[in-house]
Each structure stands twice: as C-alpha cells, then as structure tokens.
Amino acid sequence: MKRSAILRVQCPDSKGLDAALAEFIYRASGNILHFEQHMVQELGLYLARIEWDLDGFQIEMRDFARHFAPIADRLNMKWQIALSSDRLRVAVFVSKYDHCLVDLLYRWHTGELACEIPLIISNHPDAKRHADFYGVPFHVIEVTRENKSDAERRQRELLKQHRVDLIVLARYMQILSPEFIADHPQRIINIHHSFLPAFVGAKPHHQAFERGVKLLGATAHYVTEVLDDGPIIEQDVMRISHRDSLQDLVQKGRDLEKIVLSRAVGWHLEHRVLLYANKTVVFD
Amino acid sequence: MKRSAILRVQCPDSKGLDAALAEFIYRASGNILHFEQHMVQELGLYLARIEWDLDGFQIEMRDFARHFAPIADRLNMKWQIALSSDRLRVAVFVSKYDHCLVDLLYRWHTGELACEIPLIISNHPDAKRHADFYGVPFHVIEVTRENKSDAERRQRELLKQHRVDLIVLARYMQILSPEFIADHPQRIINIHHSFLPAFVGAKPHHQAFERGVKLLGATAHYVTEVLDDGPIIEQDVMRISHRDSLQDLVQKGRDLEKIVLSRAVGWHLEHRVLLYANKTVVFD
Amino acid sequence: MKRSAILRVQCPDSKGLDAALAEFIYRASGNILHFEQHMVQELGLYLARIEWDLDGFQIEMRDFARHFAPIADRLNMKWQIALSSDRLRVAVFVSKYDHCLVDLLYRWHTGELACEIPLIISNHPDAKRHADFYGVPFHVIEVTRENKSDAERRQRELLKQHRVDLIVLARYMQILSPEFIADHPQRIINIHHSFLPAFVGAKPHHQAFERGVKLLGATAHYVTEVLDDGPIIEQDVMRISHRDSLQDLVQKGRDLEKIVLSRAVGWHLEHRVLLYANKTVVFD
Amino acid sequence: MKRSAILRVQCPDSKGLDAALAEFIYRASGNILHFEQHMVQELGLYLARIEWDLDGFQIEMRDFARHFAPIADRLNMKWQIALSSDRLRVAVFVSKYDHCLVDLLYRWHTGELACEIPLIISNHPDAKRHADFYGVPFHVIEVTRENKSDAERRQRELLKQHRVDLIVLARYMQILSPEFIADHPQRIINIHHSFLPAFVGAKPHHQAFERGVKLLGATAHYVTEVLDDGPIIEQDVMRISHRDSLQDLVQKGRDLEKIVLSRAVGWHLEHRVLLYANKTVVFD
C-alpha cells in the first residue's frame, strides 16, 4: 500500500483550476495517482479529488495548509486534506438487527474497511457477542422516551473520549436529536431499508409490501435534520415477486443493506465523497 | 405455436382447488401446458393461471362457461377465459416523445407482442410518420383545457368503433378523466418514468435529479383514479452518477421505459397478470 | 412455520399429470401450499414440485411411499419426498478464504438457512475461530499430493459418521477425486468465482482481469466429474471497471460469491432444485 | 452544445503528466470540461482524456499538432485529437436480424448518437425498408463462399468512397477476412450475443441454452483477427430461467444486444475509449 495524500476541493468554476492543482503537486515532486474532477454545470461549481504518492513529496504534510492556502484563497476553494495512513475512527450504532454490524466488523477485520472501530454503541445488549468476538468495546446505552437526552449526553461523551470521526447507524432504531445531528455534519451515515425517497420513515418493508413494488431497495445517506432526506451516498435494489412474503423482504433486504452500507462507509473512509446542494459526488 | 386456452381464477383458499381445476381440464382431455397458482397467505386468497393445449380438448370453447360455471360457483371463483389465438386489440396513446411507441410497433411487427394495433391516438401530429411506416391508422385529437371532455368523447368513440381491449399510454402526457378511467378498469397501462412511489406526478426526472438518487427508475402500472397509484406490473432501474446531466437522465430513461412498458404489455397480452388488493401477480 | 411435505417428481409428459398429483393430495385431505410444474418441451419431460400442509393430511408420512407408488409406477415417475421439519445435515468444506463460510454460518445462525451443520472440514486451521464462535466442530485434514487418498478416506468417515446430506465447497481449494464425486451425486455444491463457462479452472479472477471483462461473475453448481461443468444452480454478476485492480476484483467478488452460494444452498435445502440433462430447474 | 476538443493520450507514467496537460490547455486559455486519467499500475502506463471548451481557446485546431508535438515528444506520448463538432462517419453492416440496425437508426435520428451514417451494407435485402425510412443508402452485397474476396473488395470501395471512420457490425453474420480486419484497426465494433469469453463462435444462444446458464449476456468489442477475442467495450446480462425456451432467449437477447451495442458505439463516437494490451478503458 502506497502512502498517499488525498486533497478534495470545491470552488466556483474558472479556467486553469486543473492546471493550478496539478502544478502545485508537481512542483513539490508529487506523483499523482488519481485525479478526478467534475463540473456541476447548473451551478458553475468545480469539484475535484486528487490523490498523490507521498514518496518524494517535498512538502511536509504538517505544513501543507501553509503551502496550499495561497492557491486556495486565490481560487476561492473549500478544501480538505487527508492521508491514506490516517485511519478514520468509526463508532457503529446498532439496535437488535445485527446483520450490518456483523458485516462491517468482518470487512474491517479483513482490511476491506481501512478504519479503526474504537467502540460500538447499542440500546440493546444483544449484539455484544459479535463485538466481543472482534475485540471491540461494546457500550449498552438504553434509550427511552424519558432518558433520551441523558442517553445522548452519554453517547456524546463516549464519542468525544474516543475521538470518533464517523458515526455509522447500522440499523440503529432510535431517532437522533436535531442537536446531535447538527453537531456531526456529514459525519453520520445511516442505512434506510428502502429506495429513498420512496417509503420514508417507519417500517419501509411493510410499506413496500403494501404498495406491491417489484424491486426492493436500500439507501445509505448522510443524516440531516429532516428524516431520511440527507444526501444519498449509495442505493441498490433487488427483484422481488408475489412469492415473497413480508418476512422474505426482511431477509432479502439484509443482503442489500449490508452491501449498500458497506460501500458508502468504504467510500467515506477513502475520502471519495464530496457534497454540494443536497447531493453527493462519489469519485471512483 | 400451439392453440391454447388460458384460465385465470381467484377465490377463497380451500382444500382441493388445484385438484378441481386440473381434474376439470383432464376430464375434457386437455393437456395442461402451464399450471401456476399462488396463495396470498394474509388474505386467504387463492390465485391460479392454467394454460392447456386445445388439441383434443373435448369442450367447445363457446360452451366453456356452461361447463365450468358449476365448479366456479361451488368454489366461489371469479374467473376469466381467453384463447391464445384471440389477439387483444390495443390502442396506443402517445404525445411527442415517441420512443415507447416506436418500440411497441417494432415488437408488434416482429411478433414479439401478439396483438392487433388498430389505431394510435395522439394529441400531436409528430409521431404520424412512424404509424404510417407500420401501417397503423393515426388519429390526432388535440387536447386543451377547454375541449378536454369533447376530446375524450371522440377518443371513446374511436375505442368503441375499433373494439379496443387495452389502452397503452406510451408517454401520453394528458391526464385522463376519472370517468374515462372508471370505464376502463384494468384496461389502461401507463409508463411512469420513475421508480414509483418515488417521484409521483409531473417531471419525475427533474425530481430525481434534484434529490440526487443513484438509480433511475421506470414503472408500468394499471391506471386508477389516484394519480400514479395503480397496481404496479413491472419496474426496473439503471445506475446513474454525478456525470449524468438532466438531459442524460432523459436519454437513459428511454431505454428503461421501453423495456418496462413492453414487458408489462406483453404479460397483459398473454393473460399473465392477476390483480388483488392494489397489487399484481405476474405468473411467468 | 407450517409443517409441510414436499414432493418432487419427473416423468414423461402425458395428459392428466397435474390432476393425478393434485387429486392424490386432495383425497388424503392435504391442503396444497405450492404447486409448480414445468414441461421441458424439447424432451417431452414433465417436472413438478408440490408442497402441502401436513395439518389434517391423512397419510402417515412413513407410509407415503406405499400410497404413492402405484401412481408413480403408472406414470413412470421418478420422485422424492421430504418434510420441511427434516433439516438436512450439511458439511462445509473450506480452505483459507473464509468469507463464504462465515456468511453461511451467520445465515444458519439467524435461521435463514434451515439445516444442521454438524461439522466443518478444512485443509487449513485458519477458519477455526469462526467455527468455534458458532459452536460447530472444525476438523483440520491436511491435503498434500501424497496423502490425498488418505485424506479423502478420513473426510468420508466423518461425513458418514455425521450422516451428512449435503457437502458445500465454500472456496475449498482442493480438487475432489472422481470416486468421491461419484459417491455424492447431486450432493456437492461448489462456488466458482466466475460466470461459468467463462474462466473455467484455476485463478478465474486473474483470467477475468487479463481478458478485460466489464462484469465480474460467480456461479454455484453441483459438482460432477468434469471440472466446473456441473449443473448450474445460480449465477450473478457485478459491474467492474478499469479502476478495479486484481485485488479489487477479489474483494468485490466476495460479495458475489457469498450471495450466489447462499441462494443455491438455500434452494437445495428447501428442495426447490430439480435436475435433468445437465441443467437445473429451480422452482420459486 | 458546446464546441469542444477531446485529446486522448497514453504514455509511460512519470511525475508531472497531469500538470503538463492541464498547463498546456490553460496557457492557450482553454476551459477544461472533463479531465480523466488512469494509471495502469502493472504496466506503468498513464492514460488520459481531456475535453475542453473551444470558446476562447487560442490555438487554431489545424495548428494543434504543431503546438502539442513538443510536449508529446518529450513525454513519449501517443495521442489523438478530435473535435466534438466533427461527427464520425459510420457504416452499419447487417444481415437479416435487423433489431440492432433499427435501434441504431432511431438513436441516430433522435441525436443520441452524434454521427453521420452515410451507408448501410447488407448481404440480404430484407432490412432495406428501415434504411429507406431513415433516408440512408442501403447497399446489398451478397456474400457466398465463392465471391467472398470480391464482395469485400466492393465493400471496401464503398467504405473508401464514403470516407467511413467506423464500421459497426450490427448482427452481420459473415466473418470478415484477416486482411479486411487488419486494415481497420480499432475501427470495427461487433456485437456478440453472449457474455464473452463464454460461448465464442456460432450460435451462442444455443450454447447458452444447452449449458443451462442463469443469465443471458451480450458483448460489444473491437474486432481483431482472433474470432470474438478483441478488446471488450461493454457487456451486460439479464436473468433467464427454465421457463425460457431457446426462442425466448433470442427474443430477450435482442434488448440486451441493442443496449450494449449502442452504448459501445456512443462511447466510441464521443472518443471515450482508449486501448491498451487487449483491453479498453472507457472514461465516463
């Protein structure tokens, strides 16, 4: 695995943006591994992701901001820098359905998901044995109507203590408070078991069964204050038929949810996702 | 192609339904080609489709009802009989977007869609040259806010005169009146260019583009009085990305719409579709 | 879960087969839950699967053969009977890649795969911790060029001792001897990591990468004496691109392999698979 | 539609390639619309496609080579330049199956395929009426075992006379001679009705039916001297089942072939395809 740096930028479109970015890397002797850019025509918005090999790169990464800021300021860029060697710290939230959790843990264990998982938080003790198997601390924080704000306070303490970068709601069945969400912008990924915006809210499988759709869906998205309305990172569907009972939808849905959520988390970890308006650009 | 008969039934579930149906065909020396049945557990409802070879079948089809009625009455069955040799008469309604019309005409021409197409009705003259090419009469009936009921009266006269069995709305951009719909129950198929129930109503591609979905959809459904809410016959999706402009969605959507609509029409023509609640069962 | 019986038959086509089967069940007061049949036109072959509720069924299942044999003999039927309450006993064979094993164990644990897994056999010790977690005995039988026949003898003793009904090769990297295969007809399911018949044999991901295909495949099939040539039970594909390295194919392939293998195993366990020529019919 | 230029390059990887290309465009006041690059790690090969707006670009395109050559030479680049306003001239070859031809003509007519189609060549007269409808000259050149080289000579005269850039074999059932192929490198696209490399050669649907595959495929590829072995541009599959007769495969395959071929042709026309080894990179 090469040690590389990943720069994501967005700014108003103008001539010379690609040249400015590529030149900057080249002058410091960086070898670009991936250069992807996209122009959002209707907004005149330029987005780019550049990944370069740090071998021979002549800027110390702790000084990167100082070197890059003049360019960024001149071109009015919002930007983020990351190192492939810095593994994000992920907290997984789960309730009783553990298929997404188990899947994430396995992918993490095999190295497919390059992150740290310092803790799992659940409102039920059921999934603890899986956490134990993979050696991840498991915190049970019961949530009731009455203790909700207290529960969130305890969750936030744990997140802070473990310096968590990303929260993954792996079929976590509690609704987070607007304050909690506002304090973690673009840092909470949820899996919703429908093809959003169809079947927003509770019991999407029941809704799908009632409506008689021919495809079952799943959607991974960033959580925003409007329920199931955040920027979509990934979606997928599978075919169902009249043969499938509601229970079959639940079972088939598990495979969809695992794959869709793990793709979204993986792309976030590799700094492939950019946001604008209420949408994502996922550079491959 | 074998000459065959197709019987569709639905009734409350009870023991002996398969036996009663299969016995009835066998006693009249029919050889069953396809026997498909389905039990809707939550409603205690039995549905079946039986197709048998008419070669050697000892009941004259004009006498079928008289022979079958006693069984149907005893088992409280709703039923429909059809002959593979009786080709349904289809009217295609179209506006300016002609891709679904052209696709249906080609499939009809190659024999893939076994039907008659005695006429095409449009509120615009644009698609006439395709109708002419395939030798199908093309009727332009302009529709405005003012003349809507008069236009529908003329449409209905044409449908009656041509003894039309099925109306296919192949991107017909006018909304039919509740009276028109009520008079053609389960006999109007529409193609909607989204994955219903997402993006109901006008401009679904715009809605999809705004929402930032990762898959583009299309849905063929029977038309009921509630807009875009009728029983779904077929749906499919294709992957899109941030690279796709709104215009790209329109273009990619055409392939989806053609395939989804033609499948739904084909299944209707082969008497494969049964309805209950607001859902379809499509026997394959 | 209803207690049900599943009868699978195949015989030369003739009139009255559906009636004979449905009547037989009905006369013994069985309520048919699923009746699926298929006629292989080019061979004049009739195949059927009937599942009925045993509640109220008036034939003791231990006497089933005696009651059904006269009908089967008259119609020249090959047939198999099974009870939904009789869970098949499955041995999983695995080498180092453990993703399919772990997936099967999880599905078994949640009840999605209704079977017993009395043992796992591996030529490497690596996967033992997963077996331990799920409480399944794990037998390491090393296989070398020299000890191969002895290793198979030990495997066969274990299979016999545990009364194994089905062997699942979950990325087991050893080739079984023709004798071993011949003694387990239609009782060994393998997962091959390509879209067969493309990329038969060793290193199919390497072959796919070299050939530059745009879709990655996986195939679950019954094992026969000709390598990768047995009847295909299930296949699926996923899109890849020039961005994907060989390592990416391996990683993406895991999701395909897990899903394809688990579907095939599930259908086998539910007695949905029938074989003729070198093909399968999978009744849904 | 913007007037734009498209530059494709490939060369050995080294530092500064993106910078060199982007700088070159920027210095001549070009605004880059798309910049895509890819590094083939195992070969140390750099590939890129750059598209820029010609509005305000200060190099006359007829002088482009002179300006770009020094850079290309220094970096050891193979390169091609194209203008979005220069529509490629496409000859479609067809035999009796006309679905791909009709589909291409419709897409061309709607502007989805931005090209000229100066002629269609067929060894049968059957498809002429479609050519006439779209106003494209249709040349019947019968091919027999005896007249094959003479037939190819006449084909080549027509291709030369019409200054054809791309030959599309739209289910053309004759095998081209090695000489013909060698004279049109990377300029002949064929549609093969299987998922290559499965079912090479004649009657792939028959082969697929015999083998009992669960997915039907289609592959568009550049033609090389080894049959069905050229670089794959696009592939897709659809699900089939035991219900599908050989005739059903043929019918379902038509939808696949149309879509796969039209995508491949569209990408070629938009200069999105680069070749290396025996593979394609398709920039989106």
Image (spheres, coloured by chain):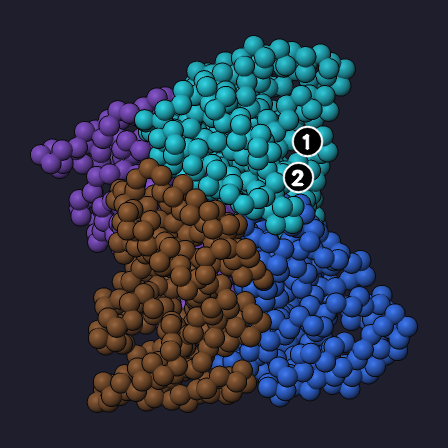
Chain colours: A purple, B brown, C cyan, D blue
Residue D271 placement, left or right of D122: left
Residue B37 against residue C90 in the figure, above or below: below
Residue at position x 76%, y 19% in the image: C145
Q: Chain ID for label 1?
A: C
The N terminus of chain C: image quadrant: top left
Q: Amino acid at mark 2?
A: Asn
Q: Nearer the viewer, residue C148 or B36?
A: B36
Residue B132 visible to the viewer: yes
The secondary structure type at the circle numbered 2 is: loop
Residue at position x 58%, y 50% in the image: D215
Which residue was labeled with disc 1?
C224
Residue A138 against residue A4 in the figure, above or below: above
Rendered image quadrant of residue C96: top right
Q: Earlier in the sequence, mark 1 or mark 2?
A: 1
Which residue was labeled with disc 2?
C278
Q: Are marks 1 and 2 in contact (CB under 8 Å)?
A: yes
